[in-house]
Amino acid sequence: MLHRATSIVARRVLLAPMPSARCMSAYAPNIEDIKKLRSASQAPMGDVKKALVASEGDFDAAYEWLRKKGIATATKKAGRVAAEGLVGLFVDSDKKRGAIVEMNSETDFVARNEQFQALLADITRTVHADSAFIGNYDTAALNVLSLNDRNVGDFIPELIGRVGENLVLQRATTVAVTRGVVAQYVHRVASASLNLGQAGALVGLEVSKELSEAERVELEAVGKKLAMHIVAAKPRFLNRESVPADRVAAERAFVLEQVAEQAKSKPANVVEKMVDGRMNKFFGEVTLIDQQHLVEEGSPKVSVVLDKAAAKLGTTISLTAFQRYEIGEEQL
């Protein structure tokens, strides 16, 4: 999506219960489940296997098992699906509006095909030109955009017939600003001239004054570095306010359970500080504004980098929107 602005009662067990059929199951994780969970959690292979056995193959339960052991982070790495293709980006010359589009193919061979790349570039520019809309396109709206007096969706089956593979126009997003810039970054470039790659990001930086050309160029450089960071760090949300309330509540409940177990004898104010510290760590993982900037020397917080740039330019800088696409990424 587009990212905008108990008590414990001790019991004595006199007789051990007979093991249930579930407990006696001889579940053995398969290699695909192991690879998927290891990729998501970055946990060691042995711990991944233990988690899958403990959860009898339930991926989410296995992930939570790893989290409770302190082995996995608060947010999963995006899952992977069997998909090839490319991401296309286009930003206009005045840097006020950008578009990002993903189109999938079955093989990398077709993704390198000139016809595939040309169509993706044309569709990306068509999405950019749809100036009445800002945000994420649903599939129906995307397919009826006009390209050369025809619907965008009409071109896909024609190209399928020529390349002999299934193709999917997966998703599209636009980002725009009134003042400031929309910056972009394309990763693992497949075509420099068409601005296509295997991953990419757009980010909108709004300012409070009109910028000179030199200032705009300077702000664009700040934005490009931030777009590079977005591709690498994979933030899920723009800021704390944009994290869904149920997600925050669930994380806080998880942290409270963890802290209650680890700090049984500590006073309430210490426990509360521990909870707040871990919630800050959670936000530092999932929200762009709170992340450590991976492209800036010393990795200061993104918010600190933007404040420093704003002071230099004599304006305020608001991080208004961002979008990150990567080929084969599960859409969470």
Image: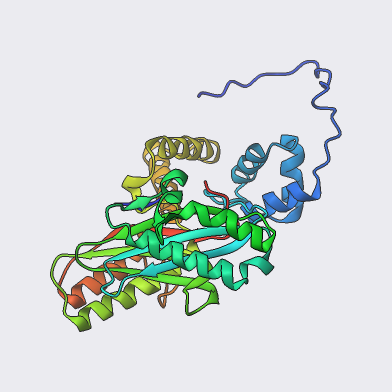
Viewer-closest of 252 and 55: 55
Q: Which residue lies furthest to the bottom in this view?
A: 214
Q: Against 212, is 55 above or below?
A: above
Q: Residue furthest top?
A: 14
Viewer-closest of 192 and 293: 192
Residue 119 position, x and y percent, is 51, 65
Q: Residue furthest left?
A: 209
Residue 72 position, x and y percent, is 60, 50
Residue 29 position, x and y percent, is 80, 43
Viewer-closest of 242 and 271: 242
Residue located at (47% from left, 75% from top): 194
Q: Looking at the image, can residue 296 be seen?
A: yes
Q: Against 314, is 149 above or below?
A: above
Q: Is residue 164 left or right of residue 120?
A: right
Q: Looking at the image, can residue 105 be seen?
A: no
Count of marks placed on residues: 0
Q: Is residue 134 left or right of residue 103?
A: left
Q: Is residue 49 left or right of residue 268?
A: right
Residue 195 position, x and y percent, is 47, 74
Residue located at (46% from left, 55% from top): 152
Viewer-closest of 94 and 255: 94
Q: Answer with the quarter of the image where residue 321 lies.
A: bottom left
Residue located at (76% from left, 49% from top): 32
Q: Residue furthest front?
A: 149
Structure colour scheme: rainbow
